Amino acid sequence: MIHNFNAGPSILPREVFEEASQAVLNFNNTGLSILELGHRTPVFQAVIDEAIALVKELMHLDDQHEVLFLHGGASTQFFQVPMNLLNENEVAAYTDTGVWASKAIKEAKLYGHVEVVCSGKESGYRQLPKNFQFPRTAKYLHLTSNNTIYGTQWHDYSAFYNAGVPLVCDMSSDILSCELDFNKFDLIYAGAQKNVGAAGVNLVIVKKDILGKVDRQLPTMMDYRNHIENGSLLNTPPVFAIYVCMLTLRWLKAQGGVSAIEKINNQKAALLYNTIDALPIFKGTVAKEDRSKMNVCFVIEDPALEKAFLDTCKENGMIGVKGHRSSGGFRVSLYNAMTLGSVEALTSLMHDFAKKNG
């Protein structure tokens, strides 16, 4: 049996794989593959309508928020956000909590002034910055909710909710993993390939009243308003990726929604972190209060044993345990589709390895 702990593209529910694979051959008994289905046909319109409705339902979104499925992944949003929201003479506030946040900062500087209100760089991004203030004149405040490379995650958003400026958040690696008041965010974006679906599509939730306030002329494809007006069908969308998103969202609803999956995610994270803390051979790399429930990062106290542990994982079907190339060590991703049984198998392996090598 394979246990897929990859950070992304990542594990998806088995039911989604089965239904999507059937749709490649014959979608809904149309005799057509989902890969050749016209995106402006009533058949696909039903798919994207259901996907949008499921996002609104699962996130409890109000009528002021629009749901879009766009090209380009989250990295495109690093420049599309400031392009739509920030004039050249205005300031945007950004939190620097890792590589992806830094990339977003770099792109935003092309369109206006950026004030980095806090940075975790000095700690190697192993701890989220504390005690910072936001400029009330900022056009918006940008966050990265979860940092896949370093294994940190914001758990308390109350300070951000009360910042007094529009709130923008990159939720690529933890969206729909826990309950939040999503209506308090003015723009949310997330690459789909972790909790939402397959790589190749980007989920954007945007509050309509923050748009249309920049002076610059926007390229047609970069203007969120055009995508809203056309229901994410301004041009040919990534049809198959959106279909997989719809199936994944349907699966999440069947599990009981976000609140139900959050309980399971808490169980998985607690089991793995408790195992790391209980075994002296391993060591967590993140401040405990900032530990991510999606990406668990740790090291082995004796570096000479690192290869042996990775080899043991591979021999037992544990895939994707090796840490990111920039940070080393180990990283175990626990996205929504990851089962508690797989985490139990990994922690059992860790106990056995510690017993033999500790």
Image (tube, helix red, strand yellow):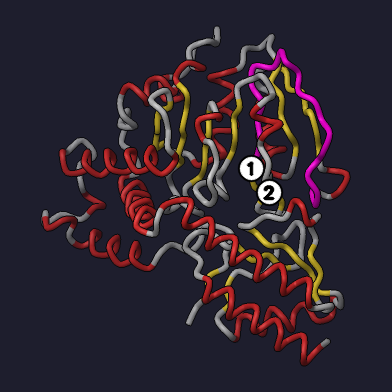
Which percent across, then down, holds residue 186? Answer: 54, 26
123 above or below 302? Answer: above
Q: CA distance from mark 1 to mark 2?
A: 6 Å
The front one of 249 and 178 is 178
Instruction: Name which residue type carries label 1.
Output: Ser
Task: Give the residue furthest to the bottom.
Answer: 356
Range covered by the magenta-colored residues: 125-145
234 above or below 356? Answer: above
Q: Quadrant of residue 51?
A: top left
Which percent across, then down, holds residue 134? Answer: 76, 23
Q: Earlier in the sequence, mark 1 or mark 2?
A: 1
Residue annotated with mark 2 = 153
Residue name at image x 75 percent, y 37 percent: 96
The quadrant of the image that shows the C terminus is bottom right
Labels 1 and 2 touching (C-beta < 8 A): yes
Magenta stretch holds residue 135: yes
Q: In this rendering, would 135 be left or right of 218?
A: right
Residue annotated with mark 1 = 145
Which element type, helix, strand or loop, lies under badge 1? loop
Magenta stretch holds residue 248: no
Instruction: Name which residue type carries label 2.
Output: Gln
Which percent across, then down, holds residue 151? Answer: 70, 55
185 above or below 171? Answer: above
- Dominant secondary structure, magenta: loop
Which percent across, then down, holds residue 103? Answer: 68, 37
